[in-house]
Amino acid sequence: MENKHETKVVFLGDSGVGKSSILLRFHRNEFSESFEVTIGGAFLQTKVELEKGFTVTLDVWDTAGQERFRSLMPLYYRQASAAVIVYDVGDMKSFQRCDYWVKTLKEQEPKCVLFLVGNKADKENREVTQEYSAEFAKIHNMITFETSAKTSKNVQTLFYQIAEITMKS
Ligand code: GTP
Ligand code: MG
């Protein structure tokens, strides 16, 4: 078996849920309280070292959550091996949006592995419980996590899972 693997991953979800922040935390171990909206899509290449010397290169597209960029999204999710659909645990509306992305991906990219990520798990005021999202993830056969780009919770785990799963598929 090859010890290198390259795979395309796309991050989707409403504006402000923390897609760029999760990537910044994983790639540079940084976090910023200020909000700089992503315009269109941003590309980032990052590596995940798995055991036994396997390295997975993730070609990640961080997309813009703002509605005005919606028509560009097919460019970013086309032929992705994995899609990370992100919501904010403190914002029910952002969770409801996930349904749209799940349907779209299942229709357009049926082989794509779907992750459901509830970010901002550090927040005290939450609108989406873990039980509620777990139910949705189960129905749609998604791998689910709660993360915090702020505290780093589960951020590494998320990327390891993406690397491992896409290597097998
Ligand atoms: P778009 O690019 O517009 O789609 O937004 P985005 O999903 O990339 O959101 P971004 O990562 O820019 O984060 C938006 C805001 O949420 C910023 O002010 C971040 O500091 C904040 N934020 C991101 N992740 C977390 C988190 O885990 N916890 C908390 N408390 N705030 C976070
Ligand atoms: Mg962004």
Image: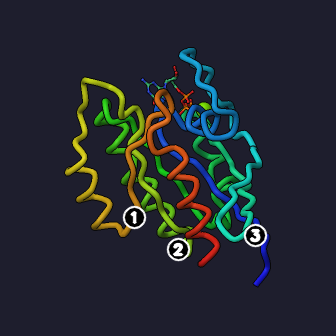
Residue at mark 3 to residue at mark 2: CA–CA distance = 21 Å
Give amino acid for label 1. Answer: Met
Where, by quadrant of the figure, is residue 108 drawn?
A: bottom right
Is disc 2's CB within 8 Å of ligand 1?
Answer: no
Q: Is residue 41 visible?
A: yes
Q: Residue at x 71, y 64 (%)?
A: 7
| Quadrant placement of the N terminus | bottom right
Q: Residue at x 69, y 50 (%)?
A: 60
SS state under label 2: loop
The first of marks 1 and 2 along the sequence is 2
Give the residue at mark 2: 110
> What label sits on residue 44 in the rendered view?
none
Give amino acid for label 3. Answer: His
Residue at mark 3 to residue at mark 1: CA–CA distance = 22 Å
Q: Residue furthest top?
A: 34
Give the residue at mark 3: 5
SS state under label 3: strand
Left or right of residue 70: residue 141: left
Give amino acid for label 2. Answer: Pro
Which marked residue is nearer to the observer: mark 1 or mark 2?
1
> What label sits on residue 142 in the rendered view?
1
Where, by quadrant of the figure, is residue 112 drawn?
A: bottom right
**Could you say where residue 159 lies in the image, as x and y percent from the top left?**
58, 53
Left or right of residue 159: residue 100: left
Front-most of 59 and 165?
165
The first of marks 3 and 1 along the sequence is 3
Where, by quadrant of the figure, is residue 5 drawn?
A: bottom right
The first of marks 3 and 2 along the sequence is 3
**Could you say where residue 144 lies in the image, as x and y percent from the top left?**
38, 56
Residue at mark 1 to residue at mark 2: CA–CA distance = 13 Å
SS state under label 1: loop
